[in-house]
C-alpha cells in the first residue's frame, strides 16, 4: 500500500509540474521509476505509472514488468493497446485460447498495436520483460480464459 501511495505521489508530482503555467521539461530516469503491484496482478507482474492515470482515463503512459517464463492467458481490451518493448523479448499471439505455436517474439525496441477487441495472449520466456503501454482511455482487460 505504501509503495502504491508513493507511486501515486510521484505521478501527481510529475503531473503537477507538467501542468504548471510555466512550460518546462519534466523527466525521470530508469532508477526513479516507481514500481507497484496493483490488486489485479496476482502473478508477479508490476506496473509503473509514468504519466497520467490508466485507471482513470485521459492520456497516460505506464510500464509493466513481467517475470520470465510467464503466460498471460487470452484476453481483450476495449481500447487499442499500444505497446513498446523496453527490455527483453515479449511474445504475443492472436486467438481466444493460449497457443504457444502462435506466439511471435518482439525484442526490445519493437512497437506493437493490438486493435481494440482483438483476442490475444502474451508470454515471456528466457527472462523478465518490460513493456510500455500508452492510451487515452481507462485501461481495462477482459479475460477469455481463466
Image: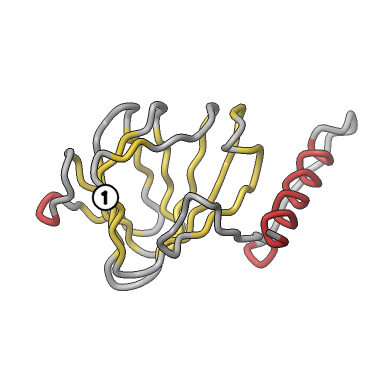
Left or right: 120, with 18 as reference point = left
Residue plotted at (72% across, 49% down): 8
Q: Residue 10's x, y, as percent?
A: 75, 52
Left or right: 67, with 51 as reference point = left
Q: Height in image: 90 above or below 68?
A: above
Q: How is the image coloured?
A: secondary structure
Of 108 and 129, the residue lying toward us: 129
Residue plotted at (48% across, 43% down): 133
For the N terminus, give its image quadrant. bottom right
Residue 59 falls in image quadrant:
top right
In the image, farthest residue toward the front: 146
Of 91 and 111, the residue lying toward us: 91
Left or right: 61, with 108 as reference point = right
In the image, farthest residue toward the left: 101
Q: Residue 139's x, y, as percent?
A: 49, 35
Residue plotted at (26% across, 31% down): 118
Element marked by disc 1? strand
Residue 54 falls in image quadrant:
top right
In the image, farthest residue toward the right: 22
Identify the residue position indicated by label 1 in the image.
Answer: 73
Q: Residue 86's x, y, as percent?
A: 46, 57
Of 83 and 58, the residue lying toward us: 58
Q: Height in image: 114 above or below 68?
A: above
Q: Residues within 10 Å of mark 1 (few under 14, many from 20)?
A: some
User: What is the count of numbered marks?
Assistant: 1
Q: Height in image: 36 above or below 78?
A: below
Amino acid at each position: 500500500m505504501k509503495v502504491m501511495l508513493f507511486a501515486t505521489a510521484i505521478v501527481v508530482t510529475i503531473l503537477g509540474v507538467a501542468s504548471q503555467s510555466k512550460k518546462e521539461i519534466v523527466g525521470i530516469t530508469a532508477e526513479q521509476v516507481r514500481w507497484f503491484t496493483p490488486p489485479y496482478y496476482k502473478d508477479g507482474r508490476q506496473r509503473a505509472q509514468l504519466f497520467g492515470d490508466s485507471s482513470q482515463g485521459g492520456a497516460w503512459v505506464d510500464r509493466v514488468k513481467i517475470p520470465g517464463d510467464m503466460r498471460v492467458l487470452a484476453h481483450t481490451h476495449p481500447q487499442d493497446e499500444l505497446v513498446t518493448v523496453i527490455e527483453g523479448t515479449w511474445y504475443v499471439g492472436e486467438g481466444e485460447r493460449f497457443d504457444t505455436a502462435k506466439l511471435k517474439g518482439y525484442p526490445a525496441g519493437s512497437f506493437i498495436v493490438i486493435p481494440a477487441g482483438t483476442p490475444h495472449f502474451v508470454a515471456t520466456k528466457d527472462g523478465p520483460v518490460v513493456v510500455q503501454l500508452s492510451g487515452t482511455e481507462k485501461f481495462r482487460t477482459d479475460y477469455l480464459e481463466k
